[in-house]
Image: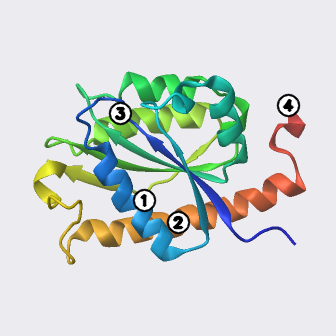
């Protein structure tokens, strides 16, 4: 019987020094850990491992699901995230991807719409459910927490449950029939 723990790769979308990505990623990890059943790897373009193509390929290959935390810069997603995604091809296939985005009034959703197209072209499975923040720095407390009744908590729990469902279903499918068998 396969290990019931699913491997979640958390992709940091920004490599800027003053990035807010760390705060949102820590919040997301806390939710995933509270849910349980995940083994979490971090893919961070601000680290040497996050820029190493072989290390990235290994972590993407080992992952069952992806959670992308991305800011929106000029109605798009950051170049550092593009470089990480483009460094790998086949290991993205038949794996689900959920998004947490942040930005100004657009909530980072322009970046997510572009990322959905990119991941679909890589034969990954972009999910509908995700989390988005307008002016995220104004919503999180200095200690990186959100108020208890904030709607993002419910959205994050839903996104993680959907991600878990797809990750489990697609892992079973990949074990039964390799995705590239028809290629």
Disc 1 + disc 2, Cβ < 8 Å:
yes
Image quarter of the N terminus = bottom right
Residue at horizontal 24%, vertical 70%?
151
Q: How is the image coloured?
A: rainbow
Disc number placed over residue 14 in the picture, else none: 3
Mark closest to the chain's N terminus, 3 or 4: 3
Mark closest to the chain's N terminus, 2 or 4: 2
Mark closest to the chain's N terminus, 3 or 1: 3
Relative image position of residue 119 (x, y in whole percent)? 55, 36
Q: CA distance from mark 3 to mark 4?
A: 34 Å
Disc 2 + disc 4, Cβ < 8 Å:
no
Q: CA distance from mark 3 to mark 2?
A: 25 Å
Tell which tag, 3 or 4, sits nearer the viewer: 3
Tell which tag, 2 or 4, sits nearer the viewer: 2
The residue carrying pointer 4 sits among few (fewer than 14), some (14 to 19) or many (20 or more) residues within 10 Å by Cα, namely: few
Residue at horizontal 31%, vertical 28%?
76
Horizontal placement of 163 versus 155: left or right? right
**Is residue 181 depicted above or below 168 in this figure?**
above
Secondary structure state at the residue bearing disc 3: loop
Q: CA distance from mark 3 to mark 1?
A: 21 Å
Disc number placed over residue 129 in the picture, else none: 1
Disc number placed over residue 162 in the picture, else none: 2
Q: Which residue is mark 4?
A: 183
């Amino acid at each position: 019987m396969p290990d019931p723990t699913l491997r979640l790769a958390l992709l940091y979308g920004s490599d800027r020094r003053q990035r807010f990505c760390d705060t949102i990623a820590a919040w997301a990890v806390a939710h995933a850990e509270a849910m349980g059943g995940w083994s979490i790897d971090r893919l961070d373009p601000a680290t040497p491992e996050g820029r190493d193509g072989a290390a990235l390929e290994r972590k993407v290959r080992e992952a069952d699901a992806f959670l992308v935390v991305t800011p929106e810069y000029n109605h798009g997603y950051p170049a550092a995230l593009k470089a990480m995604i483009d460094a790998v091809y086949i290991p993205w296939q038949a794996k689900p991807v959920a998004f947490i985005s942040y930005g100004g009034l657009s909530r980072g959703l322009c970046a997510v719409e572009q990322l959905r197209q990119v991941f679909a072209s890589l034969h990954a499975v972009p999910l509908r459910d995700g989390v988005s923040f307008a002016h995220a720095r104004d919503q999180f407390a200095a200690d990186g927490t959100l108020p208890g009744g904030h709607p993002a908590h419910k959205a994050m729990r839903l996104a993680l449950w959907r991600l878990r469902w797809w990750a489990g279903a697609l892992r079973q499918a990949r074990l039964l029939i390799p995705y590239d068998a028809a290629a």
